[in-house]
Image: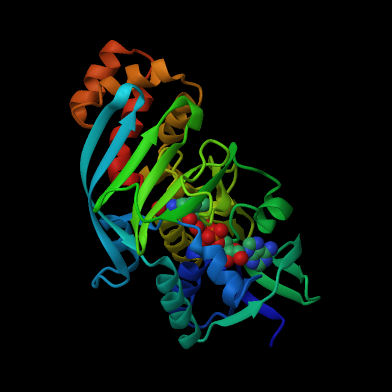
Amino acid sequence: MRTNYDLIIVGAGPAGCRAAELACKRMPDWSVLLVDNKTGDDWENYHNICAEGVSGTALKEILPEERRHIRHKLTKVEEIWPSDIRVESEIEGYIVDRKAIMKDQAENYRQWGGEVLQDAVVDIRVSGDVCRILTKGNNILTTKFLLGADGANSTVRKRVFRSESEVVVPVSQYTSRSGGKPGTLVLEYGAKYKGKYRWAFPARDGYRIGYPTGTDAPSDPKAHVQGRPIPIGLVNQLVMGNVAIIGDAAGMANPVTYAGLRNSWTSARMVIDAMAAGDLQRFEKEWRESPLADPSFLEAHRILRNSDDESLKKLAEHLRYGPNMWAIISGIVKTPGFQTFYRAHVRKLSYGW
Ligand SMILES: Cc1cc2nc3c(=O)[nH]c(=O)nc-3n(C[C@H](O)[C@H](O)[C@H](O)COP(=O)(O)OP(=O)(O)OC[C@H]3O[C@@H](n4cnc5c(N)ncnc54)[C@H](O)[C@@H]3O)c2cc1C
């Protein structure tokens, strides 16, 4: 294995696998290394923890022509707010097999000449145009470009950018034979979820039920509960010299829906396009101007986080006939100061998944 690369990508999750695949396709002359600290069952278990819900637009981002790796088609979102206010929206969405998607991307990457290393990045030193990387397995690697796609506890973010997301929400999830509805994302809001919600999504073998850790418990005490933090709130900087961060490492999950797959895939495409164009800074600007990063999502999260059940009920009343333009107008007129809340709850249908 060589020790010097044009590009090293840390993390073979949704963001890293997509970036790796695109890097080899768009920059065939570059030497590229994808590093992940997990392999085999460890990697499978880590990437099991996801409800795998995406919009049709998200799927087009990675599979423009075909529809592979779909487990369920989704047609509806049902939101349950305090006092049993129910808000229904029609969607075109899917539950996907995220691991199969990542495996295909990693296979394309390998076939196009990309290299893979199973090791943990533990330290990074940047000096001018050169990044020096130290791994747990005592590999010392150098690279011109470094891409951090290493998730919520990103080493690249901590060592190079020295920043954190505004909030990190630990969530728990288990699979149950019941508790959800076919073809529907069921989301339950309440003050106890502190800006988050309880969800029930169709899954391969029943429903994926999730909630912020500590707020609920599975009805079956023998259920296998898995947990993971989700960072909420974009970090201060996405590009520093020749280093960039994407996906959960950069706090890109949507602050209202907490969905991160589309944002991981889209940020991977944007950052590789910017690298290929020789203008990495362009990525920072493009992401911040993207509707996926609309600041109203984070503001709406803050409002939800600080609302009691009575306030949530009042906010949701305007959404009762669906999150649409009328909801925004009625909400703004009757609850001044909450424009961003309604803007986010309408825009989440187009840009939240
Ligand atoms: C319970 C739950 C349910 C979710 N449901 C949905 C959903 O329905 N829809 C949706 O869109 N999103 C969902 N999300 C969010 C989504 O899973 C994440 O946003 C997405 O996984 C982020 O991808 P990523 O590649 O940025 O990070 P990750 O998936 O965390 O991947 C990071 C990779 O980096 C590796 N790594 C970490 N540190 C190092 C290191 N130091 N050295 C080498 N490798 C390293 C890890 O092993 C991992 O493979 C959910 C999240 C959770 C927790």
- Relative to 340, say whether 32 is above or below: below
231 with respect to 139 (left or right): left
Q: Is residue 282 visible?
A: no
40 with respect to 132 (left or right): left
Query: Who is closer to the viewer here, 181 or 93?
Result: 181
Residue found farthest to the right: 138
Question: Quarter of the image holding residue 103?
Answer: bottom left
Query: Who is closer to the viewer here, 289 or 255?
Result: 255
232 with respect to 22 (left or right): right
Task: Give x and y (percent) for residue 111.
Answer: 46, 87
Task: Give x and y (percent) for residue 43.
Answer: 57, 70
- Relative to 334, say whether 34 is above or below: below
Colour mode of the rendering: rainbow
Residue at x 56%, y 64% (from the top left corner):
46
Q: Is residue 262 visible?
A: yes
Question: Quarter of the image holding residue 1?
Answer: bottom right
Count of labels shown?
0
Query: Who is closer to the viewer here, 159 or 76?
Result: 76
Residue at x 72%, y 67% (from the top left corner):
121
Task: Give x and y (percent) for residue 241.
Answer: 64, 57
Task: Give x and y (percent) for residue 109.
Answer: 48, 80
Residue at x 57%, y 51% (from the top left corner):
227
